[in-house]
């Protein structure tokens, strides 16, 4: 007989009972459901490494420009041994809306097309940026179906 999860209210406390058992295998603990299948905890979303690197570069380059270490995008490109156009495209990421940046850092943004989309010219308005990113992620979802 398979047991099922149950919930009940005990005063002001909600009690949730989930039947499971622990099993040790090779020094590791596993959580097993009543039917013997393994319960695997959900993993946290992981941000895209290339997108994180681009975001970090953008913020670093913007800081160096603000501090006067570099005065032009060409100087950054020459020093870092990369093209001026690449520096310009990546530097745009420093102007992203804060919530878009947080979504990228938290791995919650649609990572597959995000860097390609964000390397294009961005609107200055954060609301327009949000619409652009949301439209792109919806379009990507439909093309992947």
Image (spheres, rainbow, N blue to C red):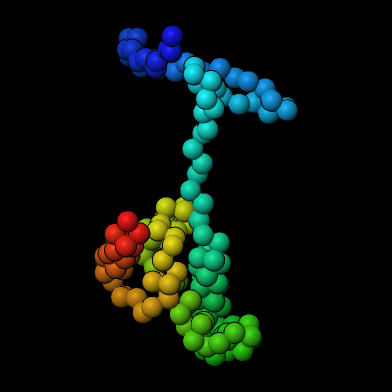
Q: Is 67 left, or right, of 101 in this rendering?
A: right
116 in relation to 15, above or below: below
Q: Nearer the viewer, residue 116 or 145?
A: 145
Q: Residue at x 40, y 15 (%)?
A: 4
- Please provide percent x and percent y for residue 103: 41, 56
Q: Residue at x 54, y 27 (%)?
A: 38
Q: Is 119 left, or right, of 57 in this rendering?
A: left
Q: Nearer the viewer, residue 41 or 144?
A: 144
Query: Quadrant where the C terminus lies?
Result: bottom left
Q: Is residue 67 visible?
A: no
1 in relation to 54, above or below: above
Numbered disc total: 0
- Please provide percent x and percent y for residue 94: 45, 71
**Residue lying at the far right of the rendered structure:** 26
Q: Residue at x 42, y 12 (%)?
A: 3
31 in relation to 106, above or below: above
Query: Quadrant where the N terminus lies?
Result: top left
Q: Is 27 left, or right, of 143 in this rendering?
A: right
Q: Is residue 118 visible?
A: yes
Q: Residue at x 60, y 26 (%)?
A: 30
- Please provide percent x and percent y for residue 17: 42, 15
Q: Nearer the viewer, residue 60 or 46?
A: 46
């Amino acid at each position: 007989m398979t047991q099922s999860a149950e919930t009940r209210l005990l005063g002001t406390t909600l009690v949730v009972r989930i039947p499971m058992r622990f099993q040790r295998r090779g020094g590791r603990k596993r959580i097993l459901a009543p039917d013997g299948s393994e319960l695997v905890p959900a993993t946290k979303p992981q941000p895209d490494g290339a997108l994180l690197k681009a975001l970090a570069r953008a913020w670093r380059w913007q800081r160096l420009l603000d501090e006067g270490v570099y005065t032009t995008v060409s100087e950054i490109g020459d020093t870092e041994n990369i093209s001026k156009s690449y520096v310009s495209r990546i530097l745009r990421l420093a102007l992203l809306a804060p919530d878009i940046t947080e979504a990228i850092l938290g791995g919650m943004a649609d990572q597959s097309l995000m860097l390609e989309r964000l390397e294009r010219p961005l609107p200055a308005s954060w609301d327009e940026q949000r619409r652009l990113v949301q439209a792109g992620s919806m379009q990507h979802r439909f093309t992947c179906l």
